[in-house]
Image: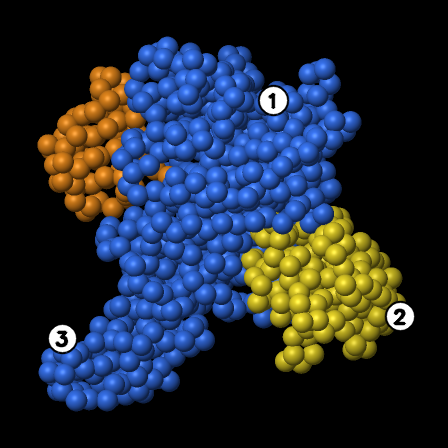
Amino acid sequence: MTRYERIDRKFKQVGTRPARPDGVDKVTGRAMYGADLTAPGMLWAKVLRSPHAHARIRSIDTSAAEALEGVKAVVTGADFSLPEDEALRDVSVNCMARDKVLYDGHAVAAVAAVSPAVAKAALKLVKVDYEVLPHVIDVDEAMRPGAPVVQEGRSYENVPGGMSANVTSHCEFGHGDLDAGFARADLVVERSFRTAATHQGYIEPHACLAAVTTDGRADLWCCTQGHFMVRETCAALLGLDSSQLRVTASEIGGGFGGKTTVFVEPVALALSRKTGRPVKAVMSREEVFRATGPTVHASIDVKIGMTRSGRITAGEAHLRYSGGAFPCATVDMGAQAAFAAYDLDAVRTFGWNAMTNRPKEAPYRAPGAPQAIYAVESVVDELCKELGLDPLDVRIANAARKGTRSAYGPTFDEIGLLATLEAAKAHPHYTAPLGPNEGRGLSCGFWFNFGGNTCVTMNLALDGTVAITEGNPDIGGSRASISLMAAEELGIPYEKVRTIVADTASIGHSDVTDGSRVTFSVGLATIEAARDAKRKMCERVARLWGIDPEAVEWRDGAVHPAGSNAGRFAPMTIAEIAAASPNTGGPIAGHHEVNADGAGVSFGVHLVDVKVDPDTGSTTVLRYTVFQDAGRAVHPSYVEGQMQGGAVQGIGWALNEEYIYGADGRLQNPGFLDYRVPVASDLPEIDTVILEIPNPGHPYGVRGVGETPIVPPLAAIANAVSRAAGVRLTELPMSPPRVLKAILARG
Amino acid sequence: MVKVRIWGSLRTATGGEAEVEVEAATFKELLDRLAEEYPGLKPQIERGVSLALDGVIYREAWFTPIREDSEVVLMPYMAGG
Amino acid sequence: MKTIPVSATVNGDAVEFLCAPDETLLDTLRDRLGLTGAKEGCGSGDCGACSVMLDGRVVCACLVLAAEAEGAEISTVEGLAQGERLHPLQRHFIDEAALQCGVCTPGILVAAKALLDRNPDPTDEEVRYWLAGNLCRCTGYDKIIRAVKSAAAEMRGDAR
């Protein structure tokens, strides 16, 4: 990682709020999303899905479906390869079942037909002979000896013998002497918590258009957070070389982590290959809920000891997560994030993952962290209440800071937690008066953030305007931020820069848009590519002037002689240099290809006031403020957007959203009516306070911000509701029936 | 020699030690040495690990130099959303 | 399957199409008329991403049969701008970052315009309740409400 010198420069364009380049397309309906593209001769795909939570497939008879007029091909598990790589193999099995169906909605077969109506009719003609097996839906049930086993032989070496075969992994983090720590405490609180599975809830269902030709070349249009990931995965599942498959990322209607893997894309490709025609596959909302990737559901025990003066002496957490019917490593991240905000001498977290007959988990913003931090911050709040201590003062007294040995191992460098806590304390929200049945809650939040494989090419058009090509789908307005950083670095107007997300054939491998990494790593690569281009332009001009390249410098969009000794030359602007580029050596471009490291962690604090109706258990959010360290806010409107959007997803998770299963193991609420996400009338304004503690790993100090905002709301709301209702809630969501039950039990 | 902190559930492979010492000057050398000297670590290393060097997380950069006095913490390979 | 001939007006233009009896207006707009601005987010009228105007009312196009559009006047997001000139709502949405992924934006713009046509000076609460049928997962609604209010102010000719 390059360590950049602390930048105290005055930015001219970074930090402003220009219009985003895709804005007009999106407000006029011109923007093309996954389901918006058509091709001549196109067929429509539909997928047959298991109605059972767990069953052996004795046989599949597709003959009647194939014989239906208008049906051009049918595929089943046999049409996909089973790669050696365990993770890819799981994706393959998840896209299309093999010998067993593992959850309600698991794909069993797919058809391609001349219209959606014919495809639907064909599904009814596919005969699947199931042997229904006992199922298990709950993580604690799944860990009991004798529980129905979802898959055999999937336990890693770190799982002790004698446990249910559903337990796939175990992890443990922390340091110090827990017993001594608890002995020093004046009060120890132990609580157990449960969180339901939730879904990212992106408004756009998965959709793609696949076209495979008889010579084995393929084109795929799809909505995705990572078209290179789609290429590598689909190539592996279909036995293609990566270079044979060109994937174009459409505009994407939300992802939040749920579109960092594939579901229908390999299916559409397989159907297209069989038919020799383009195939369009669009998931219905019900399919999205049943068969894409919700979060884990979790069962968590937390024990924390505190002195009378508010110092935490020991923290312990046991986290049992289930990522559905496949092994899942999300509990590792939850176990590491749980106590990350605290400076502790004694801390231990223990994590387990167990399989259940539920869909395969996909990341949702900061995977694993919201659940763990919900549990920890709830116990901290309870300790504060019992000891009569101010919750913010306690966080400040125990906050991790530079030099703290984190609960997950590394020692922190410069971090923004104290600054966000102090900003919260100074904010009028913290001292605003509360009325009857109202309560205030707060929580810290944390996420690691990543760098990753990133490629940027900056091409100089002959008129001196700049085209930036990069490989990361824009899920939050990143094209605007990238253009801003390029414009800043070159000293040219934002309007002279155009950033596009290129297809997999046109730019180098880029990791998925996730991990809050795009503004950080694509930004870093853009700045380095601009520096590369500037160096080349300086060399060209120096040569023209017949002087040493060290004797020129770049300033405000032009090359200038560096100092009076260099000679008297009129500066050459970027437009002039570009116009002369054919004569001075050819077209000019800057490149940067890197696996970026040095992404800085991002801390946040959320404050929320709620009112709980004691007669119905219904909660109204009255006021919400998000404090977060962005390192450097390149386009503040989009940083605010991440903070507000993540907070509201967290509000939904805390109050209403959950996967509800029946005794038959089937999902009962696969639609937006009964899977209740927040609507505009549920919410107040979401106020935002952006802090900037620059990240030394980025040339402008950028920290990723996208994921951290979903972490604090769960505990902040739980703490607020618990205080408003006068009783501690320990299960999410805190829907009205649950809150009412707790109030009535409290008496 | 570089000191490497090992997370709790991996310590069964290091005889219970929370910190081990290996001879390594880069990320890759470190992982290769750990796998050689503590074969119980091999499955996890193959599944994927990251290194935190002086507080900065490196996900997979083999040539990352490691100094003798660096703080090195082994971490699971991270994923985001 | 017998198809049904339908004549209607869409964004001011006379259109004629054939549709299946069980085809939705949303499918017709997207797959026959090339108007992909309206999106299918749920197919059950719960998300509002397919909101269009039908004879002066905001409707979910996924809940309207295409055949019901006979003789109707339909407006979609594609009809908001006048040539190069964006509607104030569209401009304010861009300027105030009231969209992130943008997939809910067409439905919200259609619904918001319907509100301002009826009530040129809505309160925050009135905007929020009017838009309660339009789900947004990216923005948390905050900037959307602000953009609708400021577009309304501009349309009223207010300085504020």
Amino acid type of the residue tagged 3 in the rendering = Glu
Instruction: Give whichever of C127, A705 is nearer the camera.
Output: C127
Point 24% across, 17% down: residue: B16
The chain carrying label 1 is A
Colour for chain B in the figure = orange
Point 63% across, 49% down: residue: A685
The verdict on a common chain for dots 3 and 1 is: yes
Label placed on residue A728: 1
The tag earlier along the polypeptide, 3 or 1, is 3
C78 sits left or right of A441 in the view: right
The answer to whether any part of residue A147 appears in the image is: yes
Tag 2's secondary structure?
A: loop
Colour for chain A in the figure = blue
Residue linked to disc 3: A550
Label placed on residue C71: 2
The chain carrying label 3 is A
Point 51% across, 44% down: residue: A427
Tag 3's secondary structure?
A: helix
Its colouring scheme is by chain
Colour for chain C in the figure = yellow
Residue A145, percent across and down?
A: 51, 12
A676 sits left or right of C116 in the view: left
A17 sits left or right of A182 in the view: right
Q: Quadrant of residue A72?
A: bottom right
Q: CA distance from mark 1 to mark 2?
A: 58 Å
Discs 3, 1 touching: Cβ within 8 Å: no
Residue A481, percent across and down?
A: 43, 62
C30 sits left or right of A266 in the view: right
